[in-house]
Image (cartoon, coloured by chain):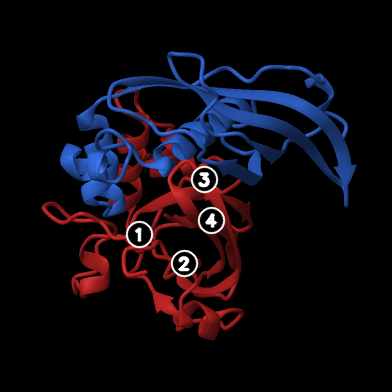
Chain colours: A red, B blue
Amino acid sequence: MTSAEPTTLVTPEMEASKGVWGPETRSYPVSESDIRKWAIAVYWPETPPRLYWDEEYAKTTKWGSIIAPEDFNPFAWPPERPATRQSAGPVPGKKPAKGENILNGGQTDTFFTPMRPGDVITSRSRLSHWEERQGRHGLTIFAYTETEWRNQKDELIKRRISIGVRY
Amino acid sequence: MANNVYFEDVSIGDEVPAFERKTDFMNWNRYAAVNDEFVFLHMDDEVGKAAGQGAAFGMGNLRWAYVLNALRNWIGDEARVRELSMQFRAINHKNDVLTTVATVRQKRVEDGEHLVDLEINVRNQDGVMTAPGHATVVVPARNG
């Protein structure tokens, strides 16, 4: 039985953390430069909307300042790089074991207050539930994680249900 | 433009103008650079192959960004995206040409807000619909 595939990809850690909010993560203050570079990257080579980089223009809109695109990630590039943040998923030169391959299965986001320069965003997540089934790559698990982001005024920024896939 | 679309002017079946990009390796890398997403699966063909995907593949969230861009271009700067949901069902291979698809399916007024619900997808150059989902935007009303 040593070479048999596992019958489940559910780990004891998943069982223990199901439904439990993890520790909060706090972002560095969002800067205009962070937002501008994000917008340039996702609109390349088109000039992104002025709302994302031109403060004088943004002041004339109902927002009153630059806002960030809905998908902007204020948690990118923390200076400390623990092993869990170095690189997700399989690495070169090592055949991934069953369950070590990962995919982003998708997500559902509900957006509330937009992010702005100067905001400090706090995030918390919890594993909601999971389902396993046989797929193109054999046994595959779909894990659903709920995440909430709030700003420094405790206003809700977004709520996300994401689907993490392992096979 | 501040506002581009008014509730009264939207009809069921309307198609949102597409946002289209060829996803070459630099395109992926620009996204990795801002999103801190240097993952071997997106960078190294051997790792992508060992994972059963043929080669390195693109980030689902880059398609997510393209759909948000399409919606923002359509609604203008002052309207809002309330919800977006997508499943990344097919892989984005290098040099794919991805085109957003967004079709109005429903209009409704809820708590005084004028909401438009859309069916969402991202089509590749072979006609494969890679990322089905839905979105809701909040738009102004001329009489609202």
SS under mark 2: loop
**Classed neighbour count for the residue bearing mark 4: other residues with Cα under 10 Å, few (<14), some (14–19), many (≥20):** many
Q: Which residue is mark 1?
A: A98
Name the spot of residue A82 as percent of width and height, x first: 21, 75
**Classed neighbour count for the residue bearing mark 1: other residues with Cα under 10 Å, few (<14), some (14–19), many (≥20):** some
Q: Which residue is mark 3?
A: A135
Mark 1 / mark 4, whichever is N-terminal:
1
Question: Quick one: quadrant of the C terminus of chain B?
Answer: top right
Mark 1 / mark 2, whichever is N-terminal:
2
Amino acid on which disc 3 is placed: Gly
Q: Are marks 4 and 2 on the same chain?
A: yes
Q: Which residue is mark 2?
A: A9
Q: Which residue is found at the position 84% from the left and 32% from the top?
A: B107
Query: Do the CB atoms of the residues marked 4 and 3 lie less than 8 Å apart?
Result: no
**Closer to us: B14 or A54:** B14
Mark 2 / mark 3, whichever is N-terminal:
2
Q: Could you tell me how far apart the alpha carbons at marks 4 and 2 are, in whole angstroms?
A: 15 Å
Query: Do the CB atoms of the residues marked 3 and 1 lie less than 8 Å apart?
Result: no
Q: Which of the two discs, 4 and 3, sits closer to the camera?
A: 3
Q: Chain of mark 4?
A: A
Q: Which residue is found at the position 27% from the left and 71% from the top?
A: A84
Q: Which residue is mark 4?
A: A163
Amino acid on which disc 2 is placed: Leu
SS under mark 4: strand
In the rendered image of this protein, does residue A133 appear above or below residue B63? below
Amino acid on which disc 4 is placed: Ile
**Closer to us: A100 or A87:** A100
Residue A154 sits in which quadrant?
bottom right
Name the spot of residue A13 as percent of width and height, x first: 45, 81
Q: Could you tell me how far apart the alpha carbons at marks 3 and 1 are, in whole angstroms?
A: 13 Å
Q: Which of the two discs, 1 and 4, sits closer to the camera?
A: 1
